[in-house]
Image (cartoon, rainbow, N blue to C red):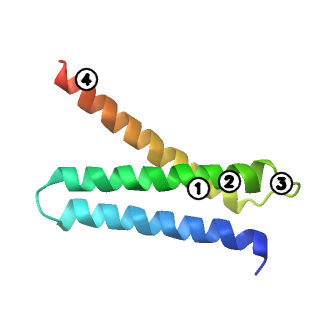
Amino acid sequence: MYKSIIIPAVAIFMQLMGFIHLYLIYKNGNSHIPAAFIELNFLAAFNAVVLLIAYFFFFKAASKTNWWVVSIGLSVLTILFLIITYSIMFFSKYK
């Protein structure tokens, strides 16, 4: 396996495991929604680190690996989901 494919593949695997864990905590865990929300914050922080790594390995690289596009897409979707969740919470409080 190429060295340039290992890093995005591991990042994608970790992201998918984080999504599965978050779903299972939300679905089968106790009735405390804040626990799933706190884990969503940790997942978004991990994805921010993935975006930072992708900046150096994808955008600055001479040869671009398409695996990074999947990892970047998952990261952006997670962070956007967190932002939307925060905005819903904010606007529902001041409604």
- Disc 2 to disc 3, C-alpha distance: 10 Å
In contact (CB < 8 Å): disc 2 and disc 1: yes
Callout 3 crowding tier (Cα within 10 Å): few <14, some 14–19, many ≥20? few
Mark 4 or 1, closer to the camera: 1
Q: Earlier in the sequence, mark 4 or mark 3?
A: 3
Q: Quadrant of residue 62?
A: bottom right
Q: Mark 4 points at which residue?
A: 91
**Residue for point 23% across, 59% down:** 26
Q: Mark 1 points at which residue?
A: 50
Of residues 45 and 24, the one nearer the viewer is: 45
The image position of residue 19, as x and y in percent, is 40, 61
Callout 1 crowding tier (Cα within 10 Å): few <14, some 14–19, many ≥20? many
Callout 4 crowding tier (Cα within 10 Å): few <14, some 14–19, many ≥20? few
Mark 4 or 3, closer to the camera: 3
- Disc 4 to disc 3, C-alpha distance: 41 Å
Q: What residue type is labelled 4?
A: Phe
In the displayed structure image, the side of residue 43 where residue 65 appears, left or right: right
**Residue for point 76% across, 81% down:** 1
- Disc 4 to disc 1, C-alpha distance: 29 Å
- Disc 2 to disc 1, C-alpha distance: 6 Å
Badge 3 marks a residue whose secondary structure is loop
**Residue for point 27% across, 50% down:** 37
Q: Name the residue under label 2.
A: 54
- Disc 2 to disc 4, C-alpha distance: 33 Å
Q: Quadrant of residue 2?
A: bottom right
Q: Mark 3 points at which residue?
A: 61
Q: Which amino acid does label 2 sit on?
A: Ala
User: Relative to residue 79, is residue 27 depicted above or below?
Assistant: below
In contact (CB < 8 Å): disc 4 and disc 1: no
User: Relative to residue 76, is residue 10 depicted above or below?
Assistant: below
In the displayed structure image, the side of residue 33 where residue 39 appears, left or right: right
